[in-house]
Image (spheres, rainbow, N blue to C red):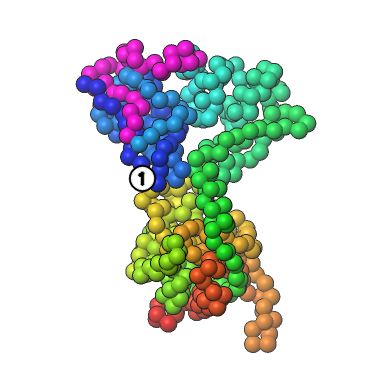
Amino acid sequence: MLVEVKVPVFSESVSEGTLLTWHKKPGEKVSRGDLLIDIETDKVVLEVTALQDGVLSEVRKGEGEIVTSEEVVGVIDTEATAGAAAPAAQAPDAQAAQPAQAHAAPVEGLSPAVRKMVAETGVNPADVAGSGKGGRVTKGDVIAHLEGGAPAAAASEAKAVPSAPTAPSGVPVTLPAGERPEQRVPMTRIRARIAERLKEAQNTAAILTTYNEVNMQPVMDLRKRYQDEFVKKHGIKLGFMSFFVRAAVEALKAYPIINASVEGKDIIYHGYFDIGIAVASERGLVVPIIRDADGKSLAQIEKEIGEYAAKARAGKLTLEDMTGGTFSITNGGTFGSMMSTPILNQPQSAILGMHNIYERAVVENGQIVARPMMYLALSYDHRIIDGREAVLFLVGIKKALEDPARLLLDL
C-alpha cells in the first residue's frame, strides 16, 4: 500500500513554507513515528513524521522548495523492502537529481543549506576542504571551491564569523579568503517574518519608551534564602523572570490599558493575562506565551519558561505556543545589555525590557551604598496609552520587586 507524506495543515495566517530537510532518502526504511522532513514557515519549524512502517519510495519535493498546506511531498510503500525503491523515487527532474545521488554518501552530516548548494552545483563534497568544526564543509567552503578549487591550506585561512542566534539555519557564516570578502545569505522565512512584523510595528504604532530603575537586592535575598528548598520541592531553580511576570500581572490589573490592544478604531481590553516571554533561538527571537499567568505560582511560571526555552533551542515550538499574548517581557540583560528600547510585539500595546543587573552607588536614607540595580524600559503605543499610565505601571513593577511581599499579599 502506498501512503502519502503530506505537509501539515497550516494556520490561516500561513500560506506556504519551505521544505528544509529530508531526514530519509528514497529506498530507505522508515518506521512509524520516524522524523521525515522539517518544514519552515514564517513562524515555526514543523516536523513531519511517518504514519506507517515501510520504505520511502518517492520524493516529490526537494530541500529548499516551496510547499503548501496538505501538499503531497513524498510516498511511503508499506510493502516494499529497504534498498528496493521504486523508479518514482527519483526527483521530478531526473537530470537535476543525478548530482545529489552521486554525492549521497558524502552529503551525510552536511547542513541543509550546504546539501542544497552541492545538489544545485554538482560539487562533490568529498572534494571540498572543510574549514568548519571537525572539518565540516560549510557554504563558504563550497563557494571557495567553485571560485578556484581552493586547497585545504587556503580553506583554513578563510575568515570565519562566529554564529549568532539569528544566523540563517543556525549555521556559522564563513567568508571566503580575500581582502574584502562578502557572502550573500538569504533570510530564513522566520527571520523575514520577524523583520516584516517589526517594521509594521514601527509604521503603525506611536512607540514611546519610559524608563525606571529597580533595586534587585530584595529579590536576590529572597532567592538566596529559599533557592535550595525551592529546587528540592519543584525540581527547578527560582529565577528572576517569574518575579517579573507576577509583578507585571499585578501592574496590568491596576492599569488595564497596558494590557489592551488596538483593532481598527476600537480598543480591546483583555480580562486575562497571557504574558509573552521573548526567547532567543538559532532562527531568531520567538515569543512563547504563558497563558493565564495571574493564576500561576512562581514555580509554575519557572517550569513553563524552562520548557519553552528547551523547545526553542530544539526548534520544536508550535504555532499554538506563540499565538496570542496580551503583554510581553524581554530580557536583554541575559546578553549584557544595560539599556535598550524594546519594540512592540503587535497587536500588543506594550512590552517590558529587563536589563543587566549591575552594582552601582545609590543614595539610601542619606547614605551612599552599593546596590544591585537594573534599568527597566517600557515601550508602549502612545495612541492609546498616555505617559501617566505608562510611568505609573513601571513604578508599580518597581514597588513589587523592591518589596516582594506585595506579590504574596496582593498589595
Q: Is residue 302 visible?
A: no
Q: Magenta stretch containing residue 74, yes or no?
A: yes
Residue at (36, 46) in percent of width and height: 12
Q: Is residue 33 visible?
A: yes
Q: Magenta stretch containing residue 364, yes or no?
A: no
Q: Amino acid at mark 1?
A: Ser
Pick the residue in front: 251 or 355. 251
The picture places residue 359, in percent across and down from the top left corner, at 65, 70
230 relative position to 70: left or right: right
Which picture quadrant has residue 135? top right
Please determine whether, in this image, residue 122 is positioned above or below residue 397.
above
> On the image, numbered disc 1 is attached to which residue?
11
Please determine whether, in this image, residue 126 is positioned above or below residue 408.
above
Residue at (35, 65) in percent of width and height: 292
Pick the residue in front: 252 or 302. 252
Q: The C terminus appears in which quarter of the rendering?
A: bottom left
Pick the residue in front: 10 or 307. 10
The picture places residue 265, in percent across and down from the top left corner, at 45, 65
Question: Which type of secondary structure does the marked residue at label 1 adopt?
Answer: loop
Q: Which residues are magenta?
A: 70-99
Pick the residue in front: 40 or 152. 40
Residue at (48, 68) in percent of width and height: 244
Please determine whether, in this image, residue 154 is positioned above or below residue 312.
above
Query: In the image as oriented, which residue stretches furthest toward the bottom?
Result: 365
